[in-house]
Amino acid sequence: MRFFRSWSELEVGDTVTFYRNFTDGDVASFLGVTGDFNPIHLDPRAAVHCGFQGRVVPGLLTGSMLTHAGGTLLPEPYPAKKMTFQFLAPVYIGETICARVTVTEKDPQKNKLTLKMTCTNKKGQVVLEAEVSGKIFPYYEQDGGGS
């Protein structure tokens, strides 16, 4: 599903919101791909011992919501040049996270786009802030294709 129909329609301040529930299967797949076998992701007792309420979703798995915004919500290819993350609170397995993504910079001369994402849990607590910048390749507007 594309939230923005074309690069030319994007404006600074445009915002989209989407949700993701992080399951045990998501965490298991992520750990298998990355090799991140930190006990706080695997062992509830280790997580509690470290001050958490239970097993914690890996931060970069939560951060992957930013790649969803850049790779799925935008109409054209958007290779990231830079990403930054601030992990502000833990995300627990089974939690649904709300991501709010805002266009903060658009430079049509350079086809540069910057997006900021703020993720909150059901309590409204900010768990992650992130930013991505990269270059848009608006070829769909030229050939009439796209989604």
Image (cartoon, grey):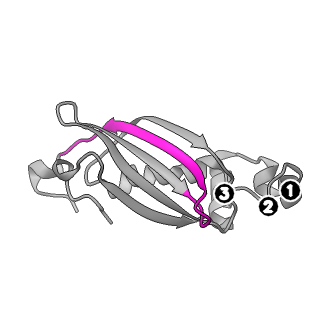
Tag 1: amino acid: Val
Residue 6 percent location from the top left of the image:
19, 54
> Which residue appears at 89% of the width and 58% of the height?
45
Q: Residue lying at the far front in this picture: please name it.
A: 124
> Which residue appears at 57% of the width and 49% of the height?
128
Measured Cα–Cα span from mark 1 to mark 2: 6 Å
- Crowd rating for badge 1 (residues with CA inside 10 Å; few <14, some 14–19, many 20+): some
Disc 1 to disc 2: CB gap under 8 Å: yes
Work out whether residue 72 or residue 143 is closer to the camera in this orientation and state it.
72
Measured Cα–Cα span from mark 3 to mark 2: 10 Å
Q: Is residue 141 left or right of residue 18?
A: left
Tag 2: amino acid: Gly
Q: Secondary structure at mark 3?
A: loop
Q: Secondary structure at mark 1?
A: helix
Where does label 3 land, which residue? 91
> Which residue appears at 49% of the width and 65% of the height?
19
Where does label 2 land, which residue? 54
Tag 3: amino acid: Val
Mark earlier in primary sequence (3, 2): 2
Residue 94 percent location from the top left of the image:
66, 68
- For the C terminus, the quadrant is bottom left
- Crowd rating for badge 3 (residues with CA inside 10 Å; few <14, some 14–19, many 20+): many
Disc 3 to disc 1: CB gap under 8 Å: no
Measured Cα–Cα span from mark 3 to mark 1: 14 Å
Mark earlier in primary sequence (1, 2): 1
Residue 127 percent location from the top left of the image:
60, 52
The segment highlighted magenta reads 120-138
Specify the label residue 83 is tagged with.
Answer: none
Where does label 1 land, which residue? 48
Queried whether the magenta region covers residue 131, the answer comes back as yes
Q: Is residue 38 left or right of residue 12?
A: right
